[in-house]
Amino acid sequence: MKVEERHYNTLYLLSALTMIFMTLALALQPLYLRSVLGLARDNAGFVNANIQVITEVVDLLFVGYLGYLSDRFGRIPLLTGGFILSGLSALALPYSLELGAMLGVGGLTFFYVVRSAMSLGTTAVWPQVATLTGDFSDVESRPRLLARTGFMMAFGATLVYAVLMQIPRYSGLTFSMLLLAVIAFFGAWLANGFLVDVAPKYTREAVPIQTILRLLKDEKALRLSFLSAFCARNDMVIIGLFLMTWCIYFADLLGMTHAEAAAQAGMVIGFIGLVVLASIPVWGEVISRIGRVPSIVMGLLLSGCGFLSLGLIDNPLSWWVLLPAFITGLGQAGCLLAPQILTLDLAPESMRGTLLGAYNTVGCLGIIFFLLVGGFLFDWLGPAMPFVFAGVANLLVMGYGFVLMKQYADES
């Protein structure tokens, strides 16, 4: 079936909705745990990170296999089913305290379970958006098309922190959390009615693990892409979770309410999203002109420097935080686009979902690692340390990419 303009437009809209759902769920989590479940500051970093780690474990267990299933049966069924599961989970999320007490498991335990179910749903959704971008493009058009979908994702994240995170101040936390269900069900309707599957189906019944390993062995650039996924895909999760948590608990020192602090933190994180939003089209052109590997190196350099600069901030609610936030946002745009484009370029057409699933699996491992380490660093060494740790990791992978660039230059 031919890809028409309406299919591209639906893909762009679903890119934004997917990121709105995932970002809003993450942004509301520290506020709900503090305001409703009464989570204390002493273990706030550990608990918030631990919940996110559990959701990432769910991603880790299923994202690779779901990528394989998308090659076998198509992207649309996974998108639709994932949105429906996420929406049903979102309906229960704001009532975790009451439902947990009713079931005798406690509000926090119930919150863990529902967030895990929600994560399983989104695991079926967000990889398919990137995979469809690969399906709808070729090597020449891919950077610009992925830049457009990335722009819409950044727009969704920016909208959450700049606008939607202001809603709890005026309409309450429960209303804000129920918006998640509305967004998910709307996404299911769009995916089922307005998208099309165009990729050839993968016919073998076994997951081609050996083929993936052989590709990683033969393609140095693919190894860089996977390393970037491990170290850089967690970056916006780190920012969204730890900066929001830092600001909410720092508010007690300034006499601010938690909702006010969450709103101000949302503005800062929204500013980062705005920088990503504005720079993504530029990155699309940069990737087309200078290549995938140099773009990855450049993105990691900016992102790493931005994170290290965040480590110098004493007050996360001061406007000085906007400077490192700007640098981090510039780097994030490149880290979002270039590794995915490179992975899609190197993937066999009938295995695009499978290879991207392996790429996302590595990314999930990275998120789990950086969240676990970051949670302990937040509680033991200070709230700025998760950013310092992430910055060092970005710069180390950048070093590998620089060596790879030099090897390519010598070979040519």
Image (cartoon, rainbow, N blue to C red):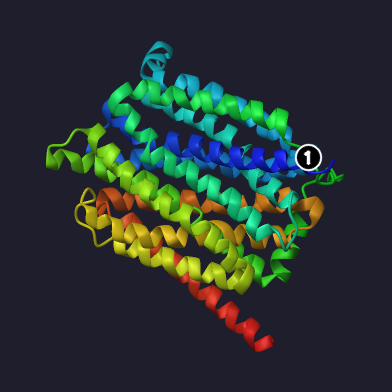
Quadrant of res 46: top left
Q: In the drawing, does residue 157 fall left or right of residue 213? A: left
| 332, above or below 107, in the image | below
Q: What residue is drawn where x is 59% and y is 26%?
A: 186
Query: Looking at the image, which is closer to me, 385 or 346?
Result: 346
- Toward the right, the furthest residue is 203
x then y, percent, for residue 19: 52, 40
Quadrant of res 310: bottom left
Query: Looking at the image, which is closer to me, 385 or 330?
Result: 330
- What count of labels does the image hold? 1
x then y, percent, for residue 356: 67, 52
Q: Secondary structure at mark 1?
A: loop
Quadrant of image for the N terminus: top right
**Crowding near pointer 1: few (<14 within 10 Å), some, many (20+)?**
some
x then y, percent, for residue 93: 44, 23
Q: Amino acid at mark 1?
A: Asp
| 288, above or below 97, in the image | below
Q: In the drawing, does residue 241 fall left or right of residue 15? A: left
x then y, percent, for residue 149: 60, 48
Q: What residue is drawn where x is 45% and y is 39%?
A: 23
Q: In the drawing, does residue 392 fall left or right of residue 206? A: left
Query: Looking at the image, which is closer to me, 40 or 24?
Result: 24
Q: In the drawing, does residue 388 fall left or right of residue 55? A: left
Say whether residue 178 is visible: yes
Quadrant of image for the C terminus: bottom right
Q: What residue is drawn where x is 23% and y is 35%?
A: 260
| 262, above or below 321, in the image | above
**Disc 1 marks which residue?**
197
